[in-house]
Amino acid sequence: MKTPSLLLAAVLLASPLRAEPPAAAPAGIVPLGVVKNVAPDDAAKLLKDHPKIVVLDVRTPEEFAAGHIAGAKNVDFQAADFAAKVAALDRKQTYLVHCAAGGRSGKTLEMMKGFTAVYHLNDGFKAWEKAGKPVAK
């Protein structure tokens, strides 16, 4: 009979949840099922190098109108249909998700499990602005 620790190791190794990302990932893109937190400088480089990434801004329309990352798609976290809008997003698309400081976008990441590639902007739009990154209005 296997010892409990060997049995646990076998279960963990067979599990589809991994601490390490899969080996085969497109160059410069986070692998399937992995969320990568990025600082504003890294996010700006990512957007420059991969212009098809969708910036998903989950702040309110008023916050968005006051300033946002150019080309961002605004989906209000506080809207009654927010979960439905997130569920309707293309799961094969790569996203950079953010809110003002990270709270709402952190909760949004839970809804995006199973998406191909998701980046999370550390400390949100406030950090983007503080880093001197461009803001569209």
Image: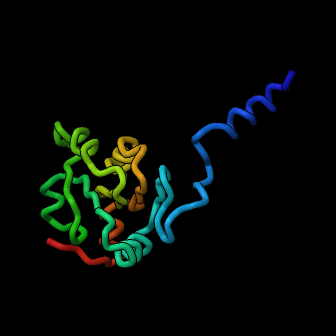
Report the quarter where the C terminus lies.
bottom left
Residue lying furthest right in this view? 1
The front one of 58 and 12 is 12
Q: How many marks?
A: 0
Residue 60 position, x and y percent, is 18, 52
Residue 102 position, x and y percent, is 36, 54
Residue 89 position, x and y percent, is 27, 49
Residue at 67 percent of width and 37 percent of height: 14
The front one of 37 and 13 is 13
Q: Is residue 45 left or right of residue 137?
A: right
Q: Quadrant of residue 101?
A: bottom left
Q: Is residue 13 left or right of residue 22?
A: right
The front one of 122 and 18 is 18
Rendered position, 110 above or below 64: above
What is the basis of the colouring in this image?
rainbow
Residue 71 position, x and y percent, is 21, 69
Residue at 12 percent of width and 56 percent of height: 62
The front one of 66 and 88 is 88
Q: Is residue 36 left or right of residue 128?
A: right
Residue at 60 percent of width and 46 percent of height: 18
Residue lying furthest top in this view? 1
Residue at 23 percent of width and 74 percent of height: 135
Rendered position, 12 above or below 130: above
Report the quarter where the N terminus lies.
top right
